[in-house]
Image (cartoon, grey):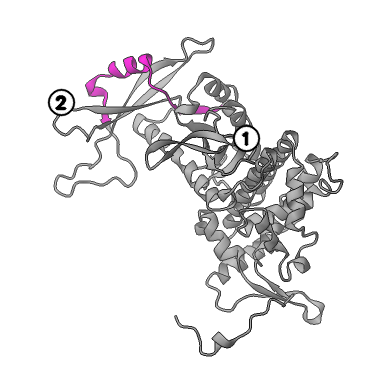
Amino acid sequence: MQLSHGWSRATPAFDDPGLVSFAGLVPVIALAERAALSGLVSAKVSIAGTAVASAGVNPAGKLSSIIAGMAAGADSIDDLDVIRSGGMPRVFAGVYACATLGQFLRSFTHGHGLQLASVARAHLVNLVAHTGLLPGLDEQAYVDIDSLLRPVYGHAKQGASYGHAKIAGRQVLRKGLSPLATTICTATGAPVIAGIRLRAGKAGSGKGAASILREAIGTARAAGATGALLVRGDSAYGNSAVVGACLAAGARFSFVLTKNPAVARAIAAIGEAAWTPVRYPGAVTDPDTGELISDAEVAEVAFTAFASTTAPVTARLIVRRVRDRARQDELFPVWRHHPFFTNNPEQVAQADITHRRHAIIETVFADLIDGPIAHLPSGRFAANSAWAICAAMTHNLLRATGTLISPKHALARGATLRRQVVAVPARLARPQRRPVIHLPAHWPWAQHWTCLWHNVFQAATGPPAIT
């Protein structure tokens, strides 16, 4: 690809008020309004008594502006100015400056964050009702929980402290803030965020897990998860409070257990004949012997966990073992054991595969880090908490948008949706007083974009009742 002759002498001019950089925001924000975003915010979020009288005015318009900016790729408060360029104010009413939005975020308190989290849950329920989000939710759904540590820098970040993070397989101390998130997915549906809660960097991974899981299970039920519901997590969440919350909510559980003497005794009691090979999806076989390259085996034993507490639980202890390849010259096989505690009724091998799919939550974290959670932009903790919740709402909105385009886009990354659907340049015109959006000729995803447009606008019946 070469530059055409003469363009080196051209004069650039940013002076066209009819150009729009992100025409895809039109159907995306229309879909958000079909799911009653503004109505939910107006009903649930009330910010009064701020230092600046106008800071808490019209929270619905300001939160919509933040979500629109995030959908366009903004990962800081200054980046939110992208929604004011060119003809964007002609397309959207009430477009706010980034300084105003930053002032609005800094007016948040912990209570306002709880109000916004309630909006996020209700908006997700409405998105499921108006799109093909989470297919098969009424048959089998999965709720996953995990946390991550986002690094921050400087001395002005409230709540920033040193916490443990794994980098290149090694545990290191890193200064940051720690979001705790729950996701909902199905066998064929990509995960969406049921809730996200910002915590100090030094917070333990399991802090607040029981309460956020109760909210996630309630959200899944409200969205239509009338069938089996399985909650999955790693060892940070394999405790009495979390398992008790799952049982009280009528959900099944599958959590890794921290190794202790009781778990070690249960593993030692498993007979050698009980171990069976497990074939993972995509497993590779040896072309010479036809045997699996992986030597993973699984077995199960009945186990009573939390015996020293007032609420012991008896269920299945499923153990996966693999050969320790670091010891090649052993006289007898040396195994590494990975136990998890579950009441999932599936066969032992399938239960192990289902549990290991908990790692799907990492794809959500990757999307957030590659998008609005690349930074936690404010020095105030409550503002960053509100920013994280808006990022979760944006993720769910883009995921719902993809379901209205094609099965491929329903599983696409957020960056893919922003590039192919949202970041479409356009020129506004009104021939014969009829609005027309002129889009690039030969746009590779023109058919998909048109499909989204028609699915959003032709099938629109107005926003649903506020729930």
Disc marking residue 332: 2
Residue shown at the point (26%, 26%) measured from the top left:
275
* Percent x, y of residue 76: 63, 53
Disc marking residue 159: 1
In terms of depth relative to the viewer, which is nearer, 458 or 254?
A: 254
335 displayed left or right of 212: left
Q: Amino acid at mark 1?
A: Gly
| Name of the residue lying farthest toward the bottom | 6
Is residue 73 within the magenta segment?
Answer: no
In terms of depth relative to the viewer, which is nearer, 444 or 141?
A: 444
Indicate the secondary structure of the residue bearing disc 1.
Answer: loop
Quadrant housing the C terminus: top right
* Percent x, y of residue 286: 19, 46
Please determine whether, in this image, residue 303 is positioned above or below residue 150.
above
Residue 345 visible to an observer of this rendering: yes
Magenta highlight range? 251-276
Question: Label 2, label 1: how many angstroms apart (C-alpha)?
Answer: 50 Å
Q: Amino acid at mark 2?
A: Phe
* Percent x, y of residue 97: 76, 58
Quadrant of residue 153 within the rendered picture:
top right
Please rate how many residues cluster around mark 2, counting C-alpha atoms within 10 Å: few if below 14, some from 14 to 19, many from 20: few
Please determine whether, in this image, residue 209 is positioned above or below residue 165.
above
Quadrant of residue 380 within the rendered picture:
top right
Disc marking residue 7: none
* Percent x, y of residue 180: 57, 36
202 displayed left or right of 280: right
